[in-house]
Amino acid sequence: MFNLEFQGNFAVFKAFILEPFPTKSGMLLHEVIRMDYAAYLRTRMTELRMRLGVSEYQMSMELGQNKNYIQGISSGKALPSMTQFFNICDYFKITPMQFFDGENLHPQLVYRAMEDMKSLNDADILLILSLIQRLKHDQSEKA
């Protein structure tokens, strides 16, 4: 599928996709998904904050910011810096990747499970994966 070419001490990678690779959404691999990241950030941050049951004021104070900091982000008047975005992710106990994974309804639990699985051997991980597949199958039959 890919053609990799190495020259001298420098690795020059030339990747060519020989056939279009459709994704779940029917888009091609090389297509860019257009997304309003600022709006998503506001919505997602509000969703996570409400799940924790904290106010904008309380979150602002706990992040060490002024009392209207989170309200400014939620209303679209401001965006956090990258450093502050990482602090917000830490506040929610999630990674930046998990922040943008809107389908994950319990990011802290998934993260904890992933951390615990790092200490398991391959056989145990495969056992857990087969259990997950069985549970997914059982859920789809109930629906």
Image (spheres, rainbow, N blue to C red):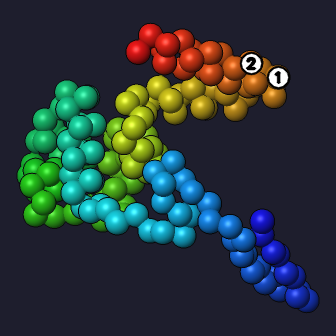
Dot 2: within a 10 Å radius of its alpha carbon, few (fewer than 14), some, or many (20 or more) residues? few
Helix, strand or loop at mark 1: helix
Residue 27 visible in the shown view: yes
Kindly identify the amino acid type of the residue bearing the numbered disc 1: Ala
Kindly identify the amino acid type of the residue bearing the numbered disc 2: Leu
Who's the residue at 68% across and 67% down the image?
A: 19
Q: Is residue 77 left or right of residue 23?
A: left
Dot 1: within a 10 Å radius of its alpha carbon, few (fewer than 14), some, or many (20 or more) residues? few
Of residues 5 and 51, which is closer to you in this image? 5
Mark drawn on residue 17: none
Percent of width and height locating residue 4: 82, 75
Of residues 119 and 43, which is closer to you in this image? 43
Quarter of the N terminus within the rendering: bottom right
Residue 115 in the image: above or below residue 21? above
Percent of width and height locating residue 67: 9, 49
Distance from disc 1 to disc 2, alpha carbons, whole Å, reads 6 Å
Of residues 39 and 119, which is closer to you in this image? 39
Who's the residue at 74% across and 18% down the image?
A: 127
Q: How many labels does the image show?
A: 2
Percent of width and height locating residue 76: 12, 60
- Snapshot quadrant of residue 119: top right
Quarter of the C terminus within the rendering: top left
Who's the residue at 9% across and 55% down the image?
A: 75
Helix, strand or loop at mark 2: helix
Who's the residue at 57% across and 57% down the image?
A: 22
Asked if the residue under mark 2 is in contact with the one under mark 1, i.e. CB atoms within 8 Å, the reply is: yes
Q: Mark 2 points at which residue?
A: 127
Q: Is residue 52 left or right of residue 86?
A: left
Of residues 133 and 104, which is closer to you in this image? 133
Q: Name the residue under label 1.
A: 123
Q: Is residue 8 left or right of residue 59?
A: right
Residue 10 in the image: above or below residue 48? below
